[in-house]
Structures are given as structure tokens and as C-alpha cells.
Image: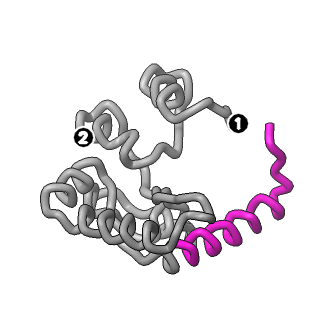
């Protein structure tokens, strides 16, 4: 049974408390509990095993083609001048290349994906198409 939550934290709280038996939390939201032994990972939903938890199989090992991963990015209003977008992109990519930031992101279970604004736009378009097909096929409606 699907149990909708208003955010990941209440869902993890219920998972830790035994109110729900399984969940698909984000890496950053659950890694501290996995490392502390309070939660047990059954699989990761990325296409391949995850460097932060190499002993945990990818769900695709049992369900070929399965891949559902989260990502975060920066956006700006469409009218933002190109020079500002380029500056923001350059600085964000520089930060993602910094060894300390990379180490901290890895500790949180996150994998940096530096890219150009055009590549980020392609990622958003591809993800929108991918998940739009799922929504339409399953006839999912907003609650």
C-alpha cells in the first residue's frame, strides 16, 4: 500500500518507528541511519551499485532496466541574462570540483554531476519525458 508523506523526514521517522516496513528514501536522507545500522538497505535504485554502499545491490540486478535516482540542480528565471547563468554555472561547477566539497557530498551519499546549462536542460527534458510516461501509463493523479 502506498502511504503518501509530506516530506521524507516523516516517512523515515515512521520507518524507524516500525509504522511502515519499506521506503524508497533518498541517499542523503537515509545514509546516516544505514551507516548506524538503524536501517537496512535492500537495494539502491540507481542503474549500478553505489560507491557509498558497494555491498548493497542495485535493484536493476534483479529487475533489469530499473533506474530511479534523485538529482538536484540550480535553476533561474527564464529571463536571467546569459552572462549571469554562465557565471553561476562556472562557480557551481568549480565548487563541485573542490576536493572538500566532493568529499562531503560523497559522505552524504551524493554524486556530483557538473554540467553546462544546456546539458542540464537536456537532463530535465529527458527526466520529464521518462517520468511523464510512467505517470501516464499508471494513470497517476495528484492527491
Which scheme is used to colour this image of the protein? one colour
Q: Which residue lies most toward the left here?
A: 99
Q: Which residue is mark 2?
A: 35
Q: Residue 53 in the image: x percent, y percent?
A: 28, 55
Label 2 vs label 1, nearer the camera: 2
> Are the residues flagged by discs 2 and 1 in contact, CB closer than 8 Å?
no
Q: Which residue is mark 1?
A: 1
* Earlier sequence position, callout 2 versus callout 1: 1
Q: Residue at x 31, y 31 (%)?
A: 38
The quadrant in which the N terminus is found is top right
Helix, strand or loop under label 1: loop
Counting other residues with Cα less than 10 Å from the Cα at mark 2, is it few (<14), some (14-19), or many (20 or more)?
few
The x, y position of residue 124, in whole percent, is 59, 68
Relative side of 50 to 106, left or right: right
Q: 10 Å neighbourhood of mark 1: few (<14), some, or many (≥20)? A: few
Residue sitting at x 38%, y 46%? 41
Q: Residue at x 33, y 56 (%)?
A: 110
Q: Is residue 104 left or right of residue 34?
A: left
Q: Which mark is residue 125?
A: none
Q: Is residue 128 magenta?
A: yes
Amino acid at each position: 500500500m502506498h502511504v503518501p508523506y509530506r516530506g521524507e523526514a516523516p516517512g523515515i521517522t515512521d520507518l524507524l518507528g516500525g509504522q511502515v516496513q519499506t521506503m524508497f528514501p533518498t541517499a542523503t536522507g537515509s545514509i546516516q541511519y544505514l551507516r548506524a545500522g538503524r536501517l537496512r538497505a535492500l537495494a539502491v535504485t540507481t542503474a549500478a551499485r553505489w560507491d557509498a554502499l558497494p555491498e548493497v545491490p542495485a535493484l536493476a540486478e534483479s529487475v533489469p532496466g530499473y533506474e530511479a535516482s534523485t538529482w538536484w540542480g540550480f535553476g533561474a528565471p527564464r529571463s536571467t541574462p546569459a552572462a549571469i547563468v554562465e557565471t553561476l554555472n562556472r562557480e557551481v561547477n568549480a565548487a563541485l570540483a573542490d576536493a572538500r566539497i566532493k568529499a562531503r557530498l560523497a559522505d552524504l551519499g551524493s554524486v556530483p554531476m557538473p554540467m553546462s546549462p544546456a546539458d542540464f536542460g537536456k537532463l530535465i527534458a529527458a527526466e520529464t519525458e521518462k517520468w511523464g510516461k510512467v505517470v501516464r501509463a499508471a494513470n497517476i493523479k495528484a492527491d
